[in-house]
Amino acid sequence: MIDNLIIGGGLAGLFCAFRLQQQGENFLLLEASAQSGGRIQPASENCAIDAGPTWFWPHQLKMQALTQELQVDVFEQYIDGDTLFQPAEPHAPIQKMHYQQGTSFRIKGGITLLINALQAQLLRKNLRFSSQVKALEKIDNGWQVLLNNNEKVRSRRLFLALPPRMIVKHLTPKSWLSENAITHMQQQQTWMSAQAKYIAIFETSFWREYGLSGFAISHRGPLVEIHDAVMPGQTSALFGFVGLDAQQRKDIPSEDLKAACRQQLLSIYGKQAVPTSDHLMDWSNNPYICSMADIGESPLHNHVNLQQLYQNEALPNLYFVGSEFSQSEPGYLEGALDAVDSALQLIDIS
């Protein structure tokens, strides 16, 4: 039996492992997919632009502290210049607005660098990828998981670094959670899990030369919001959020959707907006990120009643540390760190 088992290899799971290791604790981390990161992924192997979460903000001090601790370079999102607005009417002219977004931060080289920096601190033998959990159950002195290869792993403590809906979908909760708790968790949306993100790479950041911030709002689509995604010293890029929901996107071939996005960039930014390459990340296709309940819902931040969950359920030495369980920043990068810190405060490690 091991002392600490972590299920989930995204930011929350890796950060949990990092803090446990710093306290001299042994652990085993299980990740269902072939790589770490969860919702944190680059556009491609050759493009570091974030295909998942991109920003954190000045009030999110845990992210700022962790990037400093791991010596990961941070820079401010580019916001200088005008914002563009595309009306819904097909032939309406593009409008300029003197609107400036607030300060936000990005990681130089992409947030995957933070994942890599955390993983580099951990003992490789304690990380297992492509390890799907088939079943989870309580045992007398802890917890037991059954893996896809029929191996059984027992642990004294269990950290679930997954969103609530992924716990319900993959971890057989009927054997260890009440129906009320399962219903409550099933109601909690996984933040941005059904979102699609389009990334366009250019030879130059031409919009900056025209006095534009890169930020654009569209009532026409398919992109409803576009941002400067330049990676300093590396890549000139714009990215946008696709306004069509997952059900609407299902019947559109990805190449057709990318072509529509390219045409929209031309209509908003002009003839220079011809990308040298582009990428589309549709998170709704990932079974370890998105559930059927997430598809078709409007984006919203959930709030898990964690105190009630712990009080009403017989869950000895089980801790919910996914970002959606944060009581202050659910769904955000900061939320992953907050959920882990809050859980570790409940543990007497001696």
Image: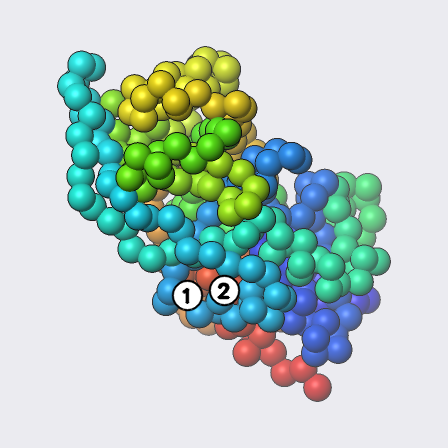
Kindly indicate the quadrant of the structure image that contains residue 248: top left
Residue 240 showing in the rendered view: yes
Asked if disc 2 and disc 1 are in contact, CB closer than 8 Å, the reply is yes
Q: Mark 2 highlights which residue? A: 63
Q: Is residue 112 above or below residue 97?
A: below
Q: Mark 1 highlights which residue? A: 60
Q: Which residue is found at the position 61% from the left and 66% from the top? A: 71
Indicate the amino acid at tag 2.
Met
What x and y, as percent, mark residue 346?
Answer: 55, 78
Q: Which mark is residue 81?
A: none
Q: Which residue is found at the position 56% from the left and 64% from the top? A: 67
Q: Which residue is found at the position 54% from the left and 24% from the top? A: 277
Q: Quadrant of the C terminus?
A: bottom right
**What kind of colouring is applied to the model shown?**
rainbow
Q: Is residue 209 above or below residue 273?
A: below
What x and y, as percent, mark residue 318?
Answer: 60, 66
Q: Secondary structure at mark 1?
A: loop
Kindly indicate the quadrant of the structure image that contains residue 212: top left
Q: Neighbour class for label 2 at 10 Å: few (<14), some, many (≥20)?
A: many
- Left or right: residue 231 compared with residue 93: right
Kindly indicate the quadrant of the structure image that contains residue 98: top left
Q: Which residue is found at the position 48% from the left and 29% from the top? A: 202
Q: Residue furthest bottom?
A: 350
What x and y, as percent, mark residue 204?
Answer: 46, 32
Q: Secondary structure at mark 2?
A: helix
